[in-house]
Amino acid sequence: MEFKHTPIMLNECINGLKIKEDGIYVDGTLGGAGHSKEILKHLSNKGLLIGIDRDEEALKAAKENLKEYNNVKYIHGNHDDIKEILEDLKIEKVDGILLDLGVSSYQLDERNRGFSYLGQNELDMRMDQTQDLTAKYVVNNYEEERLANIIFEYGEERFSRNIARNICKYREEKEIETTDELVKIIESSIPKSKQKDGHPAKRTFQAIRIEVNNEIKPLYDTVLNSIECLKEGGRLCIITFHSLEDRAVKNAYIEAQGQCTCPKELPYCVCHYKSFGKIINKKPIEADEKEREENSRSKSAKLRIFEKHTKEN
């Protein structure tokens, strides 16, 4: 299958990055390079783009899509390791970083990857095909309580305990091997009257995917590390697709911006709070109506932008 990538909120991201033509930029979720291609159009030959992705198929597609550009470095890795990646490249600071979180359209549509709850596919869900942990291992080996907690926390699924109980009951007789087997278990665990808000397996599949790829736990620190990697005046743009991601990004931005904790009656600040920059948009930017109509996956997207302080700040 062709690795297609329709970049979400493309203009908003480009404007948010405030691209300098000779700058260094990181696309930490390279994918099919939709965002990166537009970044490169704004860079001179002296500029540099660093594209990071843990999916080797994405890197192959990106190299093909960007073959006309020679100022790109491709890294098979995880944006959670951005500090180490830049250190390995002997790059101290960058002018901007873009993170487009979550699963890509290609990964959802590529049936043999097991991300989709539609059809009969192997339970995989790995963004990085070289890692060991798979969805199949999670559903067949995790204890019931651990499964229930993951489905509740990462999927915000109110019937998590029913689902976990029925998964464990099913696997006593037979190993769960395919996505359609898991879907049937989930559907049997949720009352029919409560299956009106989208596909009943959506939340559980999201939860298992997040567990397999460790998407949430490191995110808060990843945001703070990314801000640390910015030059003065550099910008970080992050697109999230569900409340868990957005909450982690929002809280990390608030932490990095800093806030005076002194009592209001004091005439001046004595807490000496530290600020690394400012939040550009207090409310997240969302896709406009036209984009939402043309690309349904943009409906839940939220863009938050942070700017590193300059000396003048």
Image (spheres, grey):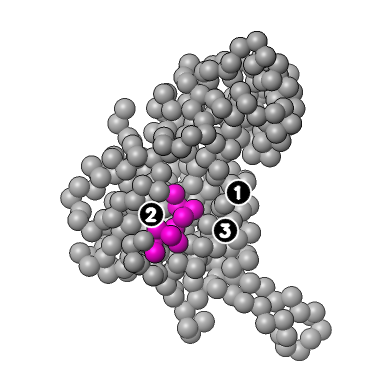
Cα–Cα span, label 2 and label 3: 17 Å
Q: Amino acid at mark 3?
A: Asp
Q: Earlier in the sequence, mark 1 or mark 2?
A: 2
- Image position of 214 (left or right of 166): left
Which residue matches tag 1? Answer: 217
Q: Nearer the viewer, mark 1 or mark 2?
A: 1
Cα–Cα span, label 1 and label 3: 8 Å
Q: Secondary structure at mark 2?
A: strand
Cα–Cα span, label 1 and label 2: 20 Å
Q: Position of residue 78 (x, y in %)?
A: 44, 49
* Residue count near mark 1 (Cα–Cα under 10 Å), binned few <14, some 14–19, many ≥20: few
Residue at point 33%, 62% (across, down): 89
Which residue matches tag 3? Answer: 221
| Span highlighted in magenta in the image | 78-87
Q: Amino acid at mark 2?
A: Asp
Q: Secondary structure at mark 1?
A: loop
Which secondary structure is most common in the magenta stretch? helix
Residue furthest to the bottom in view is 267
Q: Secondary structure at mark 3?
A: helix
* Residue count near mark 3 (Cα–Cα under 10 Å), binned few <14, some 14–19, many ≥20: some
Q: Nearer the viewer, residue 305 or 55?
A: 55
Residue at point 59%, 56% (across, down): 220
Residue furthest to the top in view is 173
Which residue matches tag 2? Answer: 27
Q: Position of residue 80 (x, y in %)?
A: 49, 53
Residue at point 74%, 75% (across, down): 261
Q: Earlier in the sequence, mark 2 or mark 3?
A: 2
